[in-house]
Image: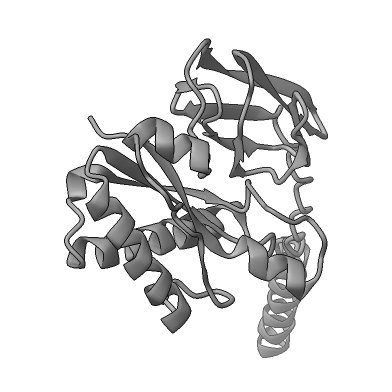
Amino acid sequence: MRRLFTLLAAIAASAFMFTACHKNRAPMPPLPQAPEAAAPAPPGPPVCKLTAEPAAIDQGSSVTLSWTSENATDVNIDPALGKQLTEGSTTASPSESTTYVLTATGASGSATCTARVTVNAGAPPTPSVSEENIQGAAGTATSVLQDIFFDYDSADLRPDAEQTLRADASMLKAHPNVAVSIEGNCDQRGSEEYNLGLGQRRANGARDYLANLGIPASEMATISYGKDKPLCTENTEDCWKQNRRDHFALKPAQ
């Protein structure tokens, strides 16, 4: 009887401990939730910067306008230059002092920036190549310098260009009181920056060839107009080949 009582007490104790353990078990923690994706921040207001180089020019000369912008989808430059890329550069030839205004527009508004170009009034124009110009500069010249022409996307002197340069060198040697400005030009295809570089290489090539023929470097200057001074404006090869040239402008030697 005592053994039975002890056995029942042990069973009861075990049942009590099992029930207590079951009731005190900690609940399972909730599964972690994936964070929600944050909405992208709206773009800030547009900002811009516009520069002119050089800031002062003579009449008939060109200036390079360069700009950058942030948070802009549209860029417009006044006067006359119109819609542009959001970052870049272009050339302009104002006839009078001008303040260029760039307006940058974006999703969060607009911004403006300016660049002032001073044009020196009364500056004499660059002499063009004509019989009268040469006679005025040299006194007794009887011939004019001839333009030379280039193949597409090339600054190499062609045989016909070399022949023309030899004749030009003879005229310059005969009139040492004449100086020459060699103006490199391109056709309308390609960017402003590329054509300015190509025009400069063309002008430099003619200068170096004339120097090898004995023309003093002090009597020659070079400048590139890129595609800004075309002789012909039609979109044809016959027109473009007229614009791929070096032009020679004469003036009295210093």
To which quarter of the image does residue 233 belong?
Answer: bottom right
Residue shown at 66% from the left, 82% from the top: 6
Picture coordinates of residue 54 (x, y %)?
A: 43, 27
Q: Is residue 130 visible?
A: yes
Residue shown at 56% from the left, 16% from the top: 116
To which quarter of the image does residue 59 belong?
Answer: top right
Answer left or right for 172 relative to 162. Answer: left
Residue 55 vertical placement versus 163 (above, below): above
Answer left or right for 154 relative to 80. Answer: left
Answer left or right for 189 relative to 109. Answer: left
Residue 37 vertical placement versus 83 (above, below): below
Front one among 223 and 33: 223
Residue shown at 51% from the left, 60% from the top: 147
Front one among 197 and 66: 197
Task: Find the residue positioned furthest to the top.
Answer: 121
Front one among 91 and 154: 154
The C terminus lies in quadrant: top left
Q: Is residue 190 visible?
A: no
Picture coordinates of residue 125 (x, y %)?
A: 51, 26
Picture coordinates of residue 85 (x, y %)?
A: 71, 46
Residue shown at 53% from the left, 10% from the top: 121
Residue 103 vertical placement versus 226 (above, below): above
